[in-house]
Amino acid sequence: MSVSPSGSGGAVRGSVTVRRGSSRRSPRPFGRSSGVPWLYLAPALVVLGGLLVYPVYQLGLISFLEYTQAQVSGGEPTTFQGFGNYAELFGDGEFWRVLLATVVFAAACVVSTLAVGCALAVLLTRVRALPRLALMMAALGAWATPAVTGSTVWLLLFDPDFGPVNRMLGLGDHSWTYGRFSAFGLVLLEVVWCSFPFVMVTVYAGIRAVPAEVLEAAALDGASQWRIWRSVLAPMLRPILVVVTIQSVIWDFKVFTQIYVMTNGGGIAGQNLVLNVYAYQKAFASSQYSLGSAIGVVMLLILLAVTLVYLRLLRRQGEEL
Amino acid sequence: MNLPRARVRRPWRLAAEASALLIAVVVAFPLYWMVLSAFKPAGEIESSEPRPWTLAPSLDSFRRVFGQQEFGRYFLNSLLVAGTVVIASALIAFLAATAVTRFRFRFRTTLLIMFLVAQMVPVEALTIPLFFLMRDFGQLNTLGSLILPHIAFSLPFAIWMLRGFVKAVPEALEEAAYIDGASRARFLWQILFPLVFPGLVATSVFSFISTWNDFLFAKSFIISDTSQSTLPMALLVFYKPDDPDWGGVMAASTVMTIPVLVFFVLVQRRLVSGLGGAVKD
């Protein structure tokens, strides 16, 4: 029987202190019943099983089949392809180009988002209430902006004809979406703009939870601000930093809307494709569902690898699940 | 403010405050430009001398947006989808989070790890199998095809995040309620639920945003019946890459952003403490 703190029960109820002998059944309604937790879990497991686990299985299955328009609407029987789709995919130079672009783009987004988010979180702790409120509100506004909306607004800002940015920078009618790198750069700006607030707010909440005495002690010992951040705050914030890093990796690796809207479905001749958009184009634009699924499986495996790293990190920190 | 005040010297603090304000302006600028462009008369948006103000605000763009076939309906569709997802996933996640924090049972840790792994699944990659699933169940072109997957995809994160909140409720409270004769269901809904509610609110921000913003599912599953469209699709009616109607796009964007902003302002304080709580555990 799990021993529960009996004194605190009294604190909640007033003066009655409940002292239990081991002969009595635990008065907790929860605890050791075998059926009840599964009852509570049932709705979640049904939904997740049907709409997450089963589709993942299907995704894997389709990636091994011949599955094109003929099978979808023509009623032709599906044929098993083995690793044929993967062979076709890996033999295609475009796939490797897109994969490389996705990894580099996601890495750039993650690093920029974390740098901006952490820097602004520290800045938030240095200022008085009014500037803090202003920055917090602006950040929440950016966070709240839907991806489609944000994409179109940034396009207008950088529009070669009517945008204020080119006017301010004196760039004439320079088109940002024409070149491969400037288009990726523009999308990166938008992605950082709408995802740094999550990092900023979370890290700020974390810094606020660090006891003031610790920081004062460090300051009294003559540590510089940078030193305080590196040797005191960063280690204490490590769990939080791990969480926001992993979340950013996951989000930025899967960017779809911004690329799709801002580069009009992957840029000129597909120069701005990332895996997600690539899979979508393969499946829904050219009806090669099995190739699209194979790309999806590749993404799944990459993110699974990231997850394993995350779990190892959590375990090393000794966090109990 | 936690950082030692004495060390932050005055000129530095002023510099920090000035840069904070400047950054706030830069961050808010896209939103300002969106609202401004929505109110600008047509000639001013499409001018080569964009000015950061307008002397003749007009509602033309909004009229055009709401005059577009059933824009109001798309708005309601979006609201219905997001609302259903928020409520359903909050309730389901609450029950599941209670199960994994208040009980000890076999496979508990396995389940927790699976919830974590489920968060990593790239939702977008599942569009293809989900498309066929929805087709087989006759759900294509219905709002159900948007609601169901979004409930599933917001659950793992919601459960993971709520865990911390449920854990924070002292077990003694549970014993006390039981001794006072409360049934399990009564404790669950009348004691635990209100205590965990702030956490539910913080969690619901994420499911609300991801659902409200959803573009891929709406684009893939609502293929022919436009009366079931949601806002992101309606917005793109105005955005033709070669000749975008910027006024219409910005007006529609403004209309689409407002509900999320309202939602954020309402839950803002809980969000900050909620995120801190969830991450700290």
Image: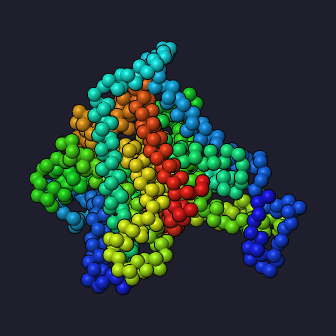
Please give the name of the residue rendered at 60% of the width and 36% of the height, measured from the top-left corner. A50
Residue A91 visible in the displayed image: yes
Residue A278, position in %: x, y? 34, 34
In the rendered image, which quarter contains the C terminus of chain B?
bottom right
Give the residue displayed 49% in from the left and 17% down from the top.
A80
Residue sitting at 24 percent across and 49 percent down? A185
Is A82 displayed left or right of B105 in the figure?
left
- Residue A196 rendering spot, x and y as whole percentages: 36, 59
Q: Position of residue B9 (x, y in %)?
A: 30, 84
Q: Quadrant of the N terminus of chain B?
A: bottom left
Indicate the quadrant where residue B193 lies: bottom right
Question: Does residue B124 appear anywhere in the picture?
Answer: no
Q: Is residue A205 left or right of residue B88?
A: left
Q: Position of residue A187 (x, y in %)?
A: 28, 49
Where residue A245 sits, quadrant-wise, is: bottom left
Counting labels gives: 0
Please state if A189 lies on the left or on the right of A143 as rendered. left
